[in-house]
Amino acid sequence: MIDEAFVRLGVRRTPQRFFIMEHLLTRPDHATAEDLWLALNRRHARASRATVYNTLHALVEAGLVREFALDGKAVRYDANLEKHHHFICDQCGAVEDIDWFETPPLKRSQSKGRIIRTCEVILRGDCHKCR
Ligand SMILES: [Zn+2]
Ligand SMILES: [Zn+2]
């Protein structure tokens, strides 16, 4: 499935690209570049941080991975391209996916002439482990 996506989008397959895609898809914990570097190093010793950043950049450019930042902390990477919301644990900082639900449209007095295309909600609280 990852290889198919690489071929479809014209992304050259490298072991690092495959590893990072696989990691993001199988562990949807919204890893940071640092998390991914640590994980990659366990498999491919001496992978540099630059390799991880370059790899992530290529995957984001291809539209396979989305990057987002929360609270001004490190950028996190998400390979779940389905529409979804996020939950953040106030205790441990875990970021989890929440199934998509529609949010009520803004009133005209709120959108003030802006064109609103999507609304992604961030829910906060205690995760299963911390509650
Ligand atoms: Zn937690
Ligand atoms: Zn997500």
Image (spheres, helix red, strand yellow):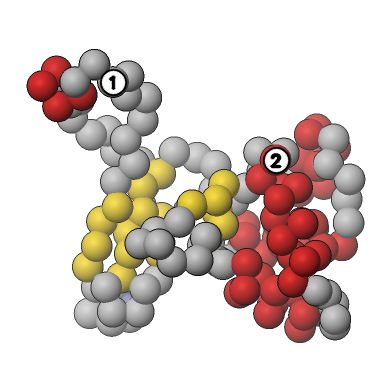
Looking at the image, residue 73 sits to the left or right of residue 7; the answer is: left
Q: Is residue 67 above or below residue 108?
A: below
Point out the tag, 1 or 2, that comes first from the N-terminus: 2
Taking the spot 87% from the left edge, 62% from the top edge, the residue there is: 15
The image's mark for residue 114 is 1
Taking the spot 29% from the left edge, 46% from the top edge, the residue there is: 121
x and y percentages locating residue 31 in the rendered image:
55, 66
Within 10 Å of disc 2 (Cα), the crowding (few <14, some 14-19, many 20+) is few
Q: Quadrant of ligand 1?
A: bottom left
Q: In front here: 108 or 99?
A: 108
| Residue type indicated by callout 2 | Glu
Taking the spot 56% from the left edge, 57% from the top edge, the residue there is: 77
x and y percentages locating residue 84 in the rendered image:
40, 44
Is residue 7 shown to the viewer in this render?
yes
* Image quadrant where one finds the C terminus: bottom left
Q: What separation in Å lies between label 1 and label 2 (alpha carbons)?
A: 27 Å
x and y percentages locating residue 75 in the rendered image:
52, 60
Q: Give the secondary structure at mark 2.
A: helix
Q: Give the secondary structure at mark 1.
A: loop
Classify residue 70 by image quadrant: bottom left
**Dot in front, 1 or 2:** 1
Classify residue 47 by image quadrant: bottom right
Q: Is residue 99 above or below residue 88?
A: above
Q: In front here: 14 or 113?
A: 113
Q: In front here: 106 or 25?
A: 106
Is residue 128 shown to the viewer in this render?
no
x and y percentages locating residue 19 in the rendered image:
77, 64
Asked if the residue under mark 2 is in contact with the one under mark 1, i.e. CB atoms within 8 Å, the reply is no
Q: Which residue is mark 2?
A: 61
Q: Tell me if the residue at label 1 has its CB under 8 Å from ligand 2.
A: no
Within 10 Å of disc 1 (Cα), the crowding (few <14, some 14-19, many 20+) is few
| Residue type indicated by callout 1 | Arg
